[in-house]
Amino acid sequence: RPVPLAEGAVLFPGLALPDVPALLAGVEAVSAECPFEQLETPGGGRMSVEMTACGVFGWRSDRKGYRYAPLCPATGRPWPPMPPAFAALSRRAAAAAGFDRAPLQSCLINRYNHRARMSLHQDRDEGELITPIVSVSLGVAATFLWGGLNRSDPTRRIRLAHGDVVVWGGPSRLTFHGVTPLPSGEHPATGPRRINITFRQVTTDM
Ligand code: MD3
Ligand code: FE
């Protein structure tokens, strides 16, 4: 069942399938409180992916830069609480990959429409790099690009399908990664979209 990808990185195909109804209900509840938004980048462009978040911290981007923040930008209120089914899945996945800490402070929700993409980047706005990141893919399958510790390292292409969970920790935590433009498609659970949920630990003090 688990597919080792590299040191610290493990793919669990379909691990989230039993949780799909609760996850999609959670995404609906969170986005009703803090709506999906195509964030502005420091360069003045707009991300093609729509994002929201729940938990203690969400991630935001604007002309001032990228950062984790305690308030939803659309409402100025705290991000919605993390639904219990979300936290349970993060715990289960981190434990299954052999980590004794699970990321529970922040849950970012990315929504990809046809052609939305994410260019190659590292996740390094978190001050905490010990705890792994847990990612859950739902809906239309995407091609994930996975490189090394340098932007110019060669990339592997990994198909992330509905229900797949990946845990990224240890030496894989700071690898460059991205998502190629979402193909046109249809999935019974999400229609033409893909939803990616990532769990993160942001600070060491909680
Ligand atoms: C490997 N999201 O939100 S999830 C992101 O599919 C992000 O929406 C992508 O990259 C998505 O930052 C990829 C898989 C993932 C997430 C975080 C990682 C892979 C990772 C952090 C380090 C290494
Ligand atoms: Fe990332």
Image: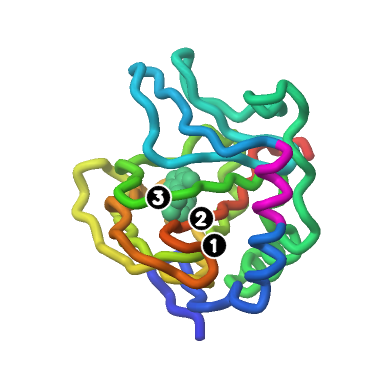
Residue 179, placed above or below residue 46 = below
Identified at 28% across, 52% down, the residue is 180
**Gap between marks 2 and 3, in whole Å?**
12 Å
Identified at 48% across, 78% down, the residue is 13
Residues at discs 1 and 2 in contact (Cβ within 8 Å): yes
**Gap between marks 1 and 2, in whole Å?**
6 Å
Mark 3 CB within 8 Å of ligand 1: no
What colour-coding does the image apply? rainbow
Q: Which residue is mark 3?
A: 113
Q: Earlier in the sequence, mark 3 or mark 1?
A: 3
Q: In terms of depth relative to the viewer, which is nearer, 95 or 55?
A: 55
Identified at 74% across, 58% down, the residue is 87
Circle on res. 196: 2
Residues at discs 2 and 3 in contact (Cβ within 8 Å): no
Location of residue 121 (image quadrant): top left
Report the side of 24 relative to 66 (left or right): right
